[in-house]
Image (spheres, rainbow, N blue to C red):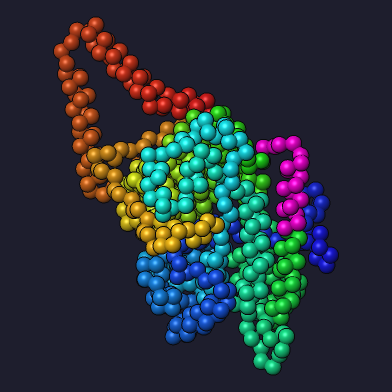
């Protein structure tokens, strides 16, 4: 541990004080990066400093430090469509749920605008590069269930370096510890620039010419925090500079260099703590929290709850099985579904964030997601979700049944994606949607916003010119192929306020197709009832129908789902 830095301590129920290390807010790095080249500034403050001044000039007309979509579009010289995307994405990753941008209705985002300091930090981290996916340590087990090739392999291969996720050795997301260390290292490297963008210049000073007020200092909460979600220590209390300030008096500004030294000391202590944690895990016996578990055949063995409310819950490595997780099963506010194959996964809970990565031949039902869903590197997956927004990247032959308040974002190397209106419900769905703020009267499922094929935030090298190629968009599912998805009623408790039907209105053409299917089914039932058959022939017919239905259950794999879910 670095000398000169004493980590904060928190007392547990046993009165033992444990150190509280600085933590990165993962949300901006996981859900806040937009692959638009004009938003990426690799020269630190050289460009962003003057841009901030322009933002202030634009906002000064309204005597506010907030800038709307028109101002963002003009200053950054991007389309109004992309400016709205910037505001919407920023709203999804802000730490405070009381910020006007977060509480605004989707139609009001343009006019409410973003706080300039938050926007500048958001733009700065667009230079962040993600860690490369890693190879699973049990490659043989993965190869047994993962297709090594696809019908699309080789298509546009000269343009796309993204075949790292299509190789015979399937790649996996970096561990949480590796990602957090990578993000902390990024902040360690760039903290001087970040503080410089927040600081104010003081006349007549030399070395200490830049200072931070308490208000500006608290904007660092966009990137870092102390403590777990729900029990965070406010930055102003964690830092020695403002902790004892008189609430009735304005806090004295603090030199930026002093804050810089304090932040770097805390980051160094946190990095050392992460290194020790990784080292003890590698040298000790494997345990349930190990992220690198092999593919599992049992339903429950690959579900890992979070150690704290800040950490996501993991559903990882499910193969040829079905699982159900409800609100009582999830301690955190986010879930990550990783590397699941040939399975049906129900996450029937109100959450803030959800990530689906590296899954194939699966059906995934997500309850209500109040901030953002990201789906990446999946093949032949059917996703059903009610959410504020969704981002789809590098997926193939997937179908999305969406109830989304913002336009679906489509980027990367996608092929044969289809979108359709939301098609299911469960008893607590509307209650969950209300909890996280998903509006059933707004569904923009058929308005995908398509960006480039290449994501400049990955750590790969890209051939010249590829960044200008637009991603393949999604097509609308044909109405005659649209069907409702049935969630068994034994999931969740019934009450008078229970959801009884799909809360998202169906478009007329899909409703007409559904009514036609219902009519056809009714006609078939009536025709069977009207058959003039002897009793023994009726029994033969009934037996034949049961046999064909049972054959379908086995051929489709649904029989496994019935057994697995009833076992739960």
Question: Where are the magenta residues, as a range?
Answer: 271-288
Q: Is residue 201 visible?
A: yes
Q: Is residue 389 visible?
A: no
For the view shown, which residue lies furthest in the right direction?
3
State yes or no: residue 204 in magenta: no
- Disc tally is 0
Residue 114 place in picture, x, y as percent: 48, 72
Give the residue drawn at x 34%, y 45%: 416
Q: In the rendered view of the protein, which quadrant contains the N terminus? A: bottom right
Camera-side residue: 294 or 370?
A: 294
Up-down relation of residue 536 to residue 387 (above or below): above
Locate residue 437: give its quadrant. Answer: bottom left
Locate residue 200: give its quadrant. Answer: bottom right
Locate residue 195: give its quadrant. Answer: bottom right
Residue 527 place in picture, x, y as percent: 17, 22
Tell whether 271 sits left or right of 439. Answer: right
Residue 510 place in picture, x, y as percent: 25, 44
Magenta segment's dominant SS is helix
Camera-side residue: 453 or 124?
A: 453
Up-down relation of residue 503 to residue 296 (above or below): below
Give the residue drawn at x 29%, y 44%: 477
Up-down relation of residue 61 to residue 241 (above or below): below
Tell whether 562 sits left or right of 46. Answer: left
Give the residue drawn at x 45%, y 44%: 378
Residue 40 place in picture, x, y as percent: 50, 68
Give the residue drawn at x 40%, y 45%: 154
Tell whether 177 sits left or right of 510. Answer: right
Tell whether 422 sits left or right of 371. Answer: left
């Amino acid at each position: 541990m670095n000398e000169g830095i004493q980590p904060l301590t928190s007392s547990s129920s046993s009165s033992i004080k444990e150190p509280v290390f600085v933590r990165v807010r993962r949300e901006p790095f996981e859900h806040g990066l937009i692959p638009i080249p004009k938003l990426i500034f690799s020269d630190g403050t050289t460009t962003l400093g003057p841009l901030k001044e322009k933002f202030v000039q634009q906002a000064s007309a309204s005597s506010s430090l907030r800038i709307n979509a028109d101002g963002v579009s003009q200053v950054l010289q991007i389309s109004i469509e992309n400016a709205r995307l910037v505001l919407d994405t920023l709203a999804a990753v802000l730490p405070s749920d009381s910020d006007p941008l977060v509480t605004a209705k989707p139609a009001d985002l343009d006019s409410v605008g973003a706080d300039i300091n938050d926007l500048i930090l958001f733009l700065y981290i667009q230079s962040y590069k993600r860690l490369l996916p890693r190879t699973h340590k049990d490659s043989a087990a993965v190869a047994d269930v993962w297709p090594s090739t696809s019908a699309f392999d080789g298509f546009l291969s000269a343009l796309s370096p993204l075949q790292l996720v299509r190789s015979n050795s399937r790649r996996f997301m970096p561990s949480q510890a590796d990602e957090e260390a990578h993000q902390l290292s990024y902040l360690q490297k760039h903290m001087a620039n970040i503080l410089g963008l927040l600081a104010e210049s003081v006349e007549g000073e030399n070395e200490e010419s830049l200072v931070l007020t308490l208000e500006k200092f608290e904007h660092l909460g966009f990137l870092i925090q102390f403590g777990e979600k729900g029990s965070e220590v406010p930055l102003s209390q964690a830092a020695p500079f403002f902790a004892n300030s008189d609430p009735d008096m304005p806090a004295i500004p603090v030199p930026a260099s002093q804050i810089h030294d304090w932040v770097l000391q805390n980051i160094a202590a946190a990095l050392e703590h992460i290194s020790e944690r990784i080292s003890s895990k590698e040298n000790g016996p494997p345990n349930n929290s190990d992220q690198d578990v092999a593919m599992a055949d049992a339903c429950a063995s690959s579900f890992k709850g979070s150690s704290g409310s800040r950490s996501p819950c993991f559903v990882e490595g499910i193969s040829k099985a079905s699982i159900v997780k409800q609100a009582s099963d999830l301690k955190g506010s986010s879930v990550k579904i990783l590397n699941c194959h040939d399975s049906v996964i129900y996450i029937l809970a109100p959450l803030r964030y959800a990530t689906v990565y590296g899954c194939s031949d699966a059906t995934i039902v997500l309850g209500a997601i109040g901030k953002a869903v990201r789906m990446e590197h999946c093949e032949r997956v059917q996703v059903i979700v009610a959410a504020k927004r969704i981002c789809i990247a590098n997926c193939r032959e997937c179908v999305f049944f969406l109830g989304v308040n913002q336009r679906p974002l489509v980027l990367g190397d996608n092929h044969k994606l289809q979108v359709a209106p939301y098609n299911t419900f469960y008893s607590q769905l509307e209650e969950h949607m209300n909890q996280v703020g998903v509006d059933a009267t707004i569904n923009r499922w058929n308005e995908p916003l398509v960006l480039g094929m290449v994501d400049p935030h990955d750590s790969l090298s890209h051939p010249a010119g590829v960044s200008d190629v637009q991603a393949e968009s999604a097509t609308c599912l044909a109405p005659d192929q649209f069907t409702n998805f049935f969630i068994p009623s034994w999931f969740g408790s019934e009450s008078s306020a229970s959801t009884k039907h799909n809360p998202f209105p169906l478009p007329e053409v899909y409703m007409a197709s559904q009514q036609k299917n219902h009519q056809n089914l009714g006609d078939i039932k009536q025709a069977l009832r009207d058959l003039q058959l002897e009793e023994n022939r009726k029994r033969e017919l009934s037996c034949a129908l049961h046999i064909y239905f049972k054959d379908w259950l086995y051929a489709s794999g649904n029989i496994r789902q019935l057994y697995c879910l009833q076992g739960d």
